[in-house]
Image: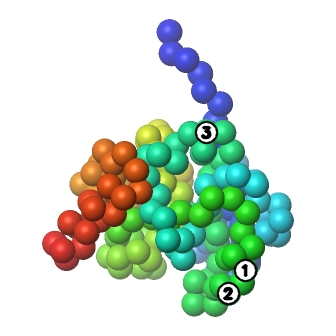
């Protein structure tokens, strides 16, 4: 008998700075897969926040915190990201390791992930692969992200902690 686990709580801070027609967070919201908030203070206090300015890499060790408190993505233009804003973000900030975008806007660009790609990468690395695929299934191009990052994602899932993720990442960056 398979044990039912509660669904992963996914929250996205949405600043409204993107084209609504291309915004992956808005599409995930329409499909009922994420909760959107427009104020930083509404983010879960102890959730894992995907923050590219964090000094700590996301790793499988973050799984328990995600199960307990949820996963958070920050959806705004990184060109206009204000560091004071990111300092006030609640939760445990983590940056994703080296991955390549599969979305049509930034296809092939290292680290320029859409919100759905960032969330899916974190879910995949933390061992929530079904949830990662479910988020990506909403997009025609969604499978592309996993396809082009499969080796990297699988390697990151084998890491015990953030330091090991960084070691794997260094190997992939040398290849490029």
Of the image marks 3 and 1, the number of the one nearer the N terminus = 3
Reading the image, the residue beneath label 2 is 82
User: Dot 3, crowdedness within 10 Å: few (<14), some or many (≥20)?
Assistant: some
Q: Earlier in the sequence, mark 3 or mark 2?
A: 3
Element at label 2: loop
Residue 85, label in figure: 1
From the viewer's side, name the closer residue of 46 and 117: 46
Distance of label 1 from label 2 (alpha carbons): 5 Å
Q: Residue at x 47, y 58 (%)?
A: 58
Look at the numbered disc 1 and give the secondary structure of its residue: helix
Name of the residue lying farthest toward the left: 175
Give the quadrant of residue 108.
bottom left
Q: Is residue 21 above or below residue 130?
A: below
85 lies above or below 41 = below
Q: Quadrant of residue 81?
A: bottom right
- Mark 1 Cα shell of 10 Å, populated few (<14), some (14-19), many (≥20): few
Mark 1 and mark 2 in contact? Answer it, CB < 8 Å. yes
Residue matched to label 3: 67
């Amino acid at each position: 008998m398979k044990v039912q686990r509660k669904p992963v709580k996914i929250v996205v801070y949405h600043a409204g700075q993107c084209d609504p027609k291309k915004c992956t967070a808005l599409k995930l919201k329409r499909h009922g897969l994420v909760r959107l908030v427009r104020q930083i203070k509404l983010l879960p206090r102890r959730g894992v926040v995907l923050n590219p300015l964090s000094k700590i890499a996301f790793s499988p060790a973050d799984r328990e915190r995600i199960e307990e408190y949820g996963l958070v993505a920050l959806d705004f233009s990184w060109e206009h990201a204000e560091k004071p804003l990111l300092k006030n973000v609640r939760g445990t900030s983590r940056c994703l390791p080296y991955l390549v975008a599969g979305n049509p806007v930034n296809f092939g660009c290292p680290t320029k992930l859409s919100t759905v790609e960032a969330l899916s990468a974190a879910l995949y690395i933390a061992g929530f692969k079904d949830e990662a695929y479910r988020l990506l299934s909403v997009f025609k191009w969604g499978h592309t992200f996993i396809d082009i990052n499969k080796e990297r994602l699988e390697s990151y899932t084998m890491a015990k902690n953030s330091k090991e993720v960084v070691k794997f990442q260094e190997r992939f960056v040398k290849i490029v």
